[in-house]
Image (cartoon, grey):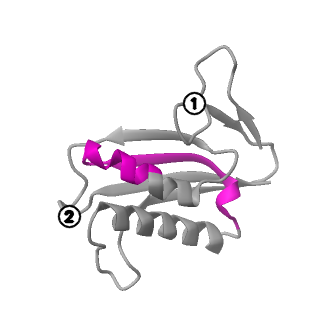
């Protein structure tokens, strides 16, 4: 995959690339929104733990598809509380491939349930 970060625009301000080009002839995986729910169905306590478990869940879906973090092309993060942004940066750094995928971060008023503080979905490609 080729990362696209044009010199003609501002460099990425965080852990993302402006674009990622995937070559033809591979497998695409679209990962549904993952939240901080443990395998036993209980919700993690607090934002940082929810974000970390959501990313672990994302990694589990990638693994089941025969892919790894290096196959991420696009990541969308949904955050309820703007003050949690520094915590998200710390968690994402634990799971961040190099070069980073294209990413979007959206602050939302709420997720489906009030106890949900973070959700992440993704697109991955395996050549």
Indicate whether residue 31 is drawn in magenta. Answer: no
Q: Is residue 62 left or right of residue 37?
A: right
Q: Looking at this view, is 26 or 47 the one in front?
A: 47
Residue 90 location, x and y as percent? 46, 54
- Magenta stretch containing residue 73, yes or no? yes
Give the residue at x 41% y 52%: 88
Residue sitting at the far bottom: 40
**Residue beneath disc 1:** 12
In this view, the residue in front, 57 or 26, is 57
Q: Residue at x 64, y 33 (%)?
A: 19
52 over 86 or under it: above or below: below
- Mark 1 and mark 2 lie on one chain; the one further toward the N terminus is 1
Magenta segment range? 67-89
For the residue carrying disc 1, how many other residues have a C-alpha within 10 Å: few (<14), some (14-19), or many (20+)? few
Q: Nearer the viewer, residue 81 or 75?
A: 81
Quadrant in which the C terminus is drawn: bottom right
Residue at the spot of label 2 = 115
> Where's residue 12, x and y in %?
57, 30
* 83, 30: nearer the viewer: 83
Residue found at the very far top of the displayed protein: 8
Q: In the picture, residue 39 is in which quadrant?
A: bottom left
Image quadrant holding the N terminus, namely top right
Q: Residue at x 58, y 20 (%)?
A: 10
């Amino acid at each position: 995959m080729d990362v696209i970060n044009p010199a003609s625009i501002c460099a990425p301000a965080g852990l993302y690339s402006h674009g990622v080009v995937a070559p033809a002839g591979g497998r695409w995986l679209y990962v549904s929104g993952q939240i901080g729910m443990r395998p036993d169905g209980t919700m993690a306590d607090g934002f940082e733990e929810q974000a970390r478990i959501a990313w672990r869940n994302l990694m589990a879906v990638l693994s089941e598809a025969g892919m790894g973090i290096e196959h991420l092309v696009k990541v969308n993060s949904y955050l309820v509380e703007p003050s949690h942004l520094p915590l998200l940066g710390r968690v994402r750094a634990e799971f961040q491939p190099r070069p980073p995928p294209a990413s979007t971060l959206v602050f939302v008023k709420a997720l489906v349930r009030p106890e949900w503080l973070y959700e992440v979905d993704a697109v991955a490609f395996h050549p």
